[in-house]
Image (cartoon, grey):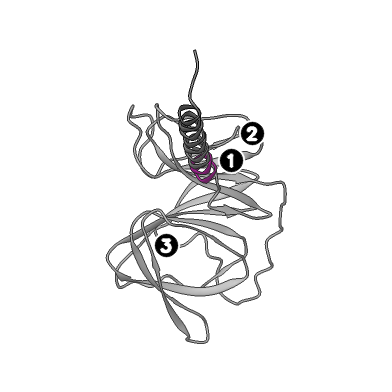
């Protein structure tokens, strides 16, 4: 079978366009996969992920090579976990279920000793109305809800802490010298706060609660 020169040229152009489109689609897919697999916080102490597990999508987190703690932001479809549950697991384990949104805190091998409290104020934890959820040789996890109109006691943070806010929250932070700052947090926002801080907090809008993981 013979092709005229214009037929051959047209076929080549179509093939080139198909190759180009395939390359673009592949690049977009790779970009989406890479973005989905990025931790939200990664430093010398922790690597933190905010992910939703799905039956139709691959595991969004590589196999855990570190011990980790999982904070459930939504209830499991099979009822095995509810919002606010906290589970600790060793490296290589997976105790998550499809359909759950979670914050996963992987614990790096970089222990930091607590700072001696010379502030003259009590430690951040325990405090009135706080609940200890979990404690082991790596961490202490606390569940706390701010009460409108009731500031926390002025307190000193002797440990690094990961805070996961469970609702939209506005807090006024006041230091011992009387300086105040209003901080706004969205539901399920996660922050890593360094130790050596002294302040009190007052809820200024709505309701607010958090899961706070102190690192040993």
Residue in the foreground of this view, choosing between 161 and 114: 161
Does 21 lie within the magenta span? no
Do callouts 1 and 2 mark residues in contact (Cβ within 8 Å)? yes
User: Is the residue marked by circle 2 packed among few (<14), some (14-19), or many (20+) residues within 10 Å?
Assistant: few
Disc 2 secondary structure class:
loop
Disc 3 or 2, which lies upstream in sequence?
A: 2
| Residue name at image x 35 percent, y 33 percent | 76
Drawn side of residue 48 relative to residue 11, left or right: right
Q: Which residue has dot 2 on it?
A: 91
Number of disc labels = 3
- Residue 62 falls in which quadrant of the image? top right
Label 3 – label 1 distance at C-alpha: 28 Å
Do callouts 3 and 1 mark residues in contact (Cβ within 8 Å)? no
Q: Is residue 154 visible?
A: no
Q: Is residue 66 visible?
A: yes
Q: Is residue 119 above or below residue 77?
A: below
Disc 1 or 2, which lies upstream in sequence?
A: 1
Drawn side of residue 146 relative to residue 9, left or right: left
Percent of width and height locating residue 143: 43, 52
Q: Nearer the viewer, mark 3 or mark 2?
A: 2
Q: Which mark is residue 68?
A: 1
| Residue name at image x 33 percent, y 27 percent | 78
User: Is the residue marked by circle 1 packed among few (<14), some (14-19), or many (20+) residues within 10 Å?
Assistant: many
| Residue name at image x 69 percent, y 68 percent | 116
Percent of width and height locating residue 112: 71, 57
Q: Which contiguous range is marked in magenta? A: 30-36
Percent of width and height locating residue 9: 50, 32
Q: Which residue has dot 3 on it?
A: 128
| Residue name at image x 46 percent, y 74 percent | 200
Q: Is residue 33 above or below residue 162?
A: above
Label 1 – label 2 distance at C-alpha: 7 Å
């Amino acid at each position: 079978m013979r092709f005229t020169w214009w037929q051959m040229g047209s076929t080549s152009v179509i093939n080139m366009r198909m190759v180009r489109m395939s390359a673009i689609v592949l690049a977009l897919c790779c970009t989406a996969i890479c973005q989905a697999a990025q931790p939200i916080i990664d430093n010398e102490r922790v690597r933190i992920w905010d992910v939703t597990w799905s039956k139709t999508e691959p595991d969004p987190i590589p196999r855990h090579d570190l011990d980790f703690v999982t904070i459930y932001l939504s209830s499991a479809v099979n009822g095995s976990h509810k919002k606010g549950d906290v589970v600790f697991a060793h490296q290589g384990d997976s105790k998550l279920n499809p359909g759950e949104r979670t914050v996963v805190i992987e614990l790096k091998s970089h222990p930091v000793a607590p700072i001696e409290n010379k502030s003259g104020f009590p430690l951040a934890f325990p405090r009135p109305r706080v609940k200890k959820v979990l404690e082991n040789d790596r961490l202490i996890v606390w569940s706390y809800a701010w009460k409108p109109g009731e500031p926390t006691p002025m307190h000193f943070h002797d440990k690094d802490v990961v805070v996961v806010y469970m609702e939209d929250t506005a807090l006024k932070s006041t230091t011992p010298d009387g300086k105040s700052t209003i901080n706004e947090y969205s539901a399920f926002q996660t922050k890593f706060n360094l130790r050596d801080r002294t302040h009190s907090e007052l809820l200024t809008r709505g309701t607010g609660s958090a899961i706070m993981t102190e690192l040993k």
